[in-house]
Amino acid sequence: MKHLKKLMAIGLTAAMVTTTFGAATALAAGDSKEVSGSHVFMFKSVGNAFGVIMYDGFSSYMEQVGENCIEKSPAETTVAAQVQLLDESITQGCKSLSISTNGDTGYDEVFAKAQESGIPVVSVDSAASADYRVTHNNQASSADIGAMQVRAAVMIELGVPYDPEDADMSKSVEAALADYDGEEIHIGVLSAGIDTPVQNGWIAEMEKELSKDIYAGKVSPELDKKYGDDEATKSTTQAQAFLAENKVDVIISPTTVGIAAAGEVLTQAQSDIKLTGLGLPSEMKNYMPASADDNEFDFVCPYMMLWDVKHLGASTAAIQMAVQNDGFDGAAGSTMTMEAWGDYAEETFTAEEDGDGTSVLTGIPYVFYKDNMAEWVDVL
Ligand code: RAM
């Protein structure tokens, strides 16, 4: 509930998203004067509303603490395009690098150059190598995000509404499956890039969830995976392929670009294939119920999840400021403080071991469904 209030306090309008998007595109071309002495924020690519909202939070926090920042996201969602912009930013003397990566490998040389130049690298959303990052800003527990998407997919296929009393859906899915003796349910995944760390981490957690006894013989443990590279056109083509093949009952899309593309394709085709995953209410409003009076199963996406994206950007800025001013080095067990910002009170986060490095958990997954969509369409 605490987080819900926080989310409601964001006050980001659709109009602001549009304006900021225009600015991000213009800034992507870059200018050495702006990069020099600025904190660089790099999303997977420009034109992704998730990245736009995150940068809005990042820049708002940086502005509050009197620092300059700039977005330098590439036109294409590739490692090579990010590496080039990272290299340029380092050469031009940026203060710090905050990045959501497009892949696991290919960054070592440029990250080593950042390290040698004393430029701290913090990853957010999609992690950078533990060898080079100070820490990773984790938007919500990967295990929860993976498991909740599987539970939502199965419940939606079985016609079970979301019950906020069972926030992580664990009880609802167990009860629904206990009563189910129909054909095995098949789930498709429409992801971002085949090498994208964050989506691959969530998919691994989906597979872990599906290996639990409650699913045995009722839901196939094999996920049918397709990759839209976080590009609208490719994601649309992949969603059309699911439709043409007609092998899956429900699609999970753990990317805001993919879920919006699939929403359009499935809705236009009046398909029986249902949809859930991670989406922005503003981009999903045409494929989801709008109010408690709606029957959610009349829509391709009865419910879906995400987290507070603007806060995610602001907490990334706060991590960079803690590195710059407070000697925060991301060591396991060390803490950092995010100062009061907007309607948010001061918060302290602790770095925890995560793989070979650490991460700081700054959010929780939140379910959007018919009772709360109206509050969110103009916010996220
Ligand atoms: C997309 C991106 C991002 C992911 C969200 C949910 O915008 O792929 O990495 O976290 O969706």
Image (cartoon, rainbow, N blue to C red):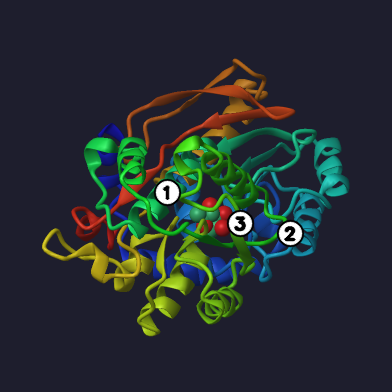
Label 1 to label 2: alpha-carbon separation: 22 Å
Give the farthest residue toward the top. Answer: 333
Q: Is residue 310 above or below residue 333?
A: below
Q: Nearer the viewer, residue 59 or 176?
A: 176
175 with respect to 327 (left or right): left
**Is label 3 in a helix, a strand or a loop?**
loop
- At horizontal 37% and vertical 51% (from top left) the residue drawn is 181
Q: How crowded is mark 2: few (under 14 residues within 10 Å), some or many (20 or more)?
A: many
> Where does label 2 land, which residue?
82
> Where does label 1 land, which residue?
310
Instruction: Give the number of callouts.
Output: 3
Splitting the image into 4 quarters, where does residue 85 fall? bottom right
Q: Where is residue 189 in the image (x, y as percent from the top left)?
A: 55, 60
Mark 2 Cβ and ligand 1 under 8 Å apart: no
Q: Specify whether residue 42 is in view.
A: yes
Which three-letter amino acid code belongs to the residue tagged 1? Lys
The quarter in which the N terminus is drawn is top left
**Is label 2 in a helix, a strand or a loop?**
helix
Label 1 to label 3: alpha-carbon separation: 13 Å
- At horizontal 57% and vertical 49% (from top left) the residue drawn is 221
Q: Position of residue 369 (x, y in %)?
A: 26, 55
